[in-house]
Image (cartoon, rainbow, N blue to C red):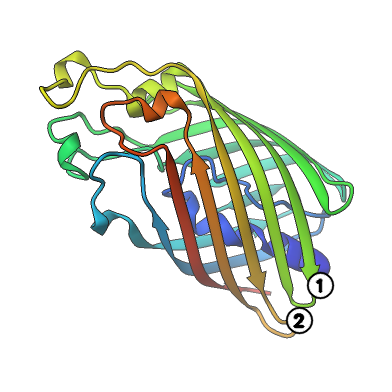
């Protein structure tokens, strides 16, 4: 049951993956056992840093999907193949959909007449070391969808605690994004500039993320109850853009999921 609960922590933030950048693999896998298909539905809230980002865009229903096979896994917006998955280590190649930094020019008056910035599909790998409750994870990704053509590296410290039927995970993360990635989503081309929206070219920078997640599931029940909070502090390269007005973002999730045993 302990392995089941710790693995189930993946579900806590999976529902936000589709709309939240760099949230893939927020929750760690433990052990090498398989986990059947888990499906659910959540309500996610996130306020992107773009100026005037519409309130109607901040809350939406999102799916929860998880599967752990012998080597193949699907974790929300992330799929992968692990070459090593033990109690302490996981080494895997991954593909990751990132839509949290994307926007349509209808999302805000500040973005009017801008070209839409589409989601990216990233490919790379991660390595995770968790000898006990504390652990370290390193992820490296690059865009293969010909959108931003950018890259991202994430380093994370995390702690997993279980109390009866409740499992809790906290983490702190540093995410480096190169200039191509930052400039695609937060830059303003000269042809897009206006009197109230200056041209801007973003360089590489670091973002800082802190999160708390929890899942409750009784031993005799396939139902999971899920909650999560994530706080992001953006670097100056994002904060200084003429289309942003905030250097921080809060994301939340509540949801329910069902495991098909």
Is residue 91 visible in this depiction of the protein?
A: no
Percent x, y of residue 125:
66, 32
Are there few (<14), some (14-19), or many (20+) residues within 10 Å of tag 1? few
Taking 241 as reference, is 257 left or right?
right
Q: Relative to the observer, which residue lies in front, 62 or 206?
A: 206
Residue contact between numbered discs 1 and 2, judged by CB atoms under 8 Å: yes
Sequence-earlier tag: 1 or 2: 1
Residue linked to disc 2:
219
The answer to whether residue 220 is left or right of residue 244 is: right
- Residue 1, label in figure: 1
The kind of secondary structure element at disc 2 is: loop
* Among the 4 quarters of the image, the one containing residue 228: bottom right
Q: In what quadrant of the picture does the C terminus appear?
A: bottom right
Q: Secondary structure at mark 1?
A: loop
The residue lying at 42 percent from left, 61 percent from top is 44
Q: Is residue 198 left or right of residue 74?
A: left
Q: CA distance from mark 1 to mark 2?
A: 7 Å
Residue 197 horizontal/vertical position (percent): 18, 25
Residue at 51%, 43% in the rendered image: 232
60 or 244, nearer to the observer: 244
What residue appears at the point 78 percent right and 62 percent down from the top-left corner? 161
- Residue 53, x across and y down, in percent: 26, 46
User: For residue 10, what is the image quadrant?
Assistant: bottom right
Q: Is residue 86 above or below residue 190?
A: below
Please determine whether, in this image, residue 101 is positioned above or below residue 9: above
Q: Position of residue 14 (x, y in %)?
A: 54, 56
Using a 10 Å C-alpha cutoff, classify the residue at mark 2 as few (fewer than 14 neighbours), some (14 to 19) or many (20 or more). few
């Amino acid at each position: 049951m302990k392995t089941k609960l710790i693995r189930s922590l993946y579900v806590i933030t999976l529902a936000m993956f589709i709309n939240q950048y760099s949230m893939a693999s927020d929750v760690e896998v433990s052990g090498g056992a398989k986990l059947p298909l888990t499906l659910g539905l959540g309500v996610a809230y996130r306020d992107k840093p773009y100026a005037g980002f519409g309130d109607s865009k901040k809350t939406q229903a999102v799916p929860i999907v998880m599967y752990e096979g012998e080597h193949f896994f699907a974790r929300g917006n992330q799929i992968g193949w692990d070459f090593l998955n033990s109690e302490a280590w996981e080494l895997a190649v991954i593909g990751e959909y990132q839509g949290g930094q994307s926007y349509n020019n209808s999302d805000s008056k500040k973005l009017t007449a801008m070209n839409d910035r589409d989601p990216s599909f990233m490919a790379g790998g991660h390595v995770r070391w968790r000898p006990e409750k504390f652990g370290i994870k390193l992820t490296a990704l690059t865009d293969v969808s010909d959108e931003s053509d950018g890259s991202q590296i994430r380093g994370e410290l995390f702690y997993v605690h279980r109390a009866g039927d409740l499992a809790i995970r906290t983490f702190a993360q540093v995410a480096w994004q190169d200039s191509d990635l930052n400039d695609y989503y937060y830059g303003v081309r000269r042809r897009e500039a206006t009197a109230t929206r200056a041209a801007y070219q973003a360089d590489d920078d670091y973002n800082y993320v802190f999160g708390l997640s929890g899942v409750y599931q009784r031993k005799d029940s396939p139902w999971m109850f899920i909650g999560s909070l994530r706080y992001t502090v953006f670097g100056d390269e994002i904060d200084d853009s003429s289309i942003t007005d905030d250097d921080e973002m809060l994301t939340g999730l509540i949801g329910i999921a069902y495991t098909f045993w």
